Image (tube, rainbow, N blue to C red):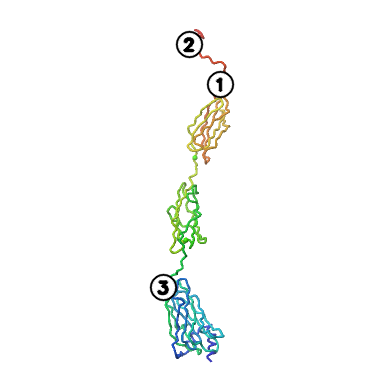
Amino acid sequence: MHKNITFYYLASLFLISITAIIAATPTSQAAGPITSVELVASSSTITEGEDFWLYVNITDVQNLYSCQISLIYDSSIIEYQDVSEGTFLNSNLSQQTFRVNPIVEPDIIKGYAISRVGNISGASGSGRLASFRFRTIKPNANTNIQIWTGANQGTKLLNDALANITYNTSNISISTAASTDTIAQDTITPYIKNLTPIKNAIDVKRDTKISLEIVDTGSGVNPQSIILKINNYQVTPVVNADGGSYSVTYQPTTIFDYNQLVNISINAQDLSFPANIMPQENYSFIIEPAPDTTAPVISEISISDITNHSATISWKTNESTDSQINYGAQKNPSSLNTETKIDQLSRQHTITIDNLLENTIYEFTIISRDYQDNSAQSTIRNFQTSIASIPNSNTPKVYSVDTLCKELGPNM
Ligand SMILES: [Ca+2]
Ligand SMILES: [Ca+2]
């Protein structure tokens, strides 16, 4: 008769729980050795980040048909993963046993149930009921794992008459250890590459952005450790992961000054423990000078070596400029329709203009341009070419005043 009850009991296990039925069943005191339920850990050293198994073993039991297991533990130290059935209840069976998954709540796993199925007797002796897998999440801590026997879904042992089997419990204390996993032999600090602007760059645009990469061999760069300073002022760059490296980009919110020396410093560490700390990377660059918008100044204009066909004009400028003279024979209005030019930049300028007419007044103006094409132009000036010398076979006769008087006579 009880086998039919068992059958219905197992069916109902899906829907409700075995607890109510168990609670209604009178306890039977078994004769002989005291049955015990013991907890055993798979390893004496439980290391952070690793899994271990908590075995639920039973000893000296008679006629165990079903069991229900509940455990209490500290879920801040170990984390439940899963459970698998032991071999005790399903040993020597042609049929499979029947299981109900536990209810997992913080600090408690309730009602993991295993039962034989059908019109058979229970198992006797000693063996393993279940293996609970936990993961250690907190190192250097202690937690007790206890068999919970609470009224709802607590630990129960039933015989084939669905009567409780009394038992002793053996709890366990677990000590956890710090992970011994270290990132092997990473002793190399991160380093910097792909600087923009490059070290000691000049003529950098005032609105330049600053970018670089931080690379680490081994454990990788710790992005939290990256510190970017511009002129000793810490800024918040955009940091993007690229494998174990990071790209660091910063667009200043205000543009730099002309000719400004910009000092950059970078700090970073890798992820190994203890961290390998990169020596602070320092470099600088210089912002472009202000554009030249000032015209040159022309001074010390001189005209020399005037002949009947040429003249030399010289001048100075206060910065390097090209040299140009526009000139022409004087007319009214002025005509400066001939141009002579030297492109090479200089502060001293000399141009000889040639092929001039003799005995002619020429006028000219000087134009000087700097490298930014700012130009200066002088006022219009003039000179007169000489008269060509007369071919002469007779040396002119030079008279003294006295001789002249004598020759011209006393009427003079
Ligand atoms: Ca490293
Ligand atoms: Ca200038």
Specify the amino acid type for callout 2: Asp
Indicate which disc, 2 or 1, sits on the residue closer to the N terminus: 1
Question: Where is residue 397 drawn, in percent x and y?
Answer: 53, 14
Indicate which disc, 3 or 2, sits on the residue closer to the N terminus: 3
**Residue holding disc 3:** 141
Question: Where is residue 171 drawn, in percent x and y?
Answer: 43, 80
* Residue at the extreme front of the image, as rendered: 185
**Residue holding disc 1:** 389
Which quadrant of the view contains residue 74? bottom left
Spatial CA span between label 3 and label 2: 138 Å
Residue at 55% across / 27% down in the picture? 310
Label 2 CA crowd tier, 10 Å (few <14, some 14–19, many 20+): few
Which quadrant of the view contains residue 362? top right
Label drawn at residue 290 = none
Note whether residue 377 is visible.
yes
Q: Please tell me which residue lies in front, 339 or 245.
A: 245
Question: Where is residue 371 drawn, in percent x and y?
Answer: 52, 40
Specify the amino acid type for callout 3: Ala
Note whether residue 24 is visible.
no
Q: Are marks 3 and 1 in contact (CB under 8 Å)?
A: no
Q: Nearer the viewer, mark 3 or mark 1?
A: 3
Q: Is the residue indicated by label 3 positioned so its CB lies within 8 Å of ligand 1?
A: no
**Disc 3 secondary structure class:** loop
**Residue holding disc 2:** 402
Label 3 CA crowd tier, 10 Å (few <14, some 14–19, many 20+): some
* Residue at the extreme top of the image, as rendered: 410
> Is residue 46 placed above or below 269 in the rendered structure?
below
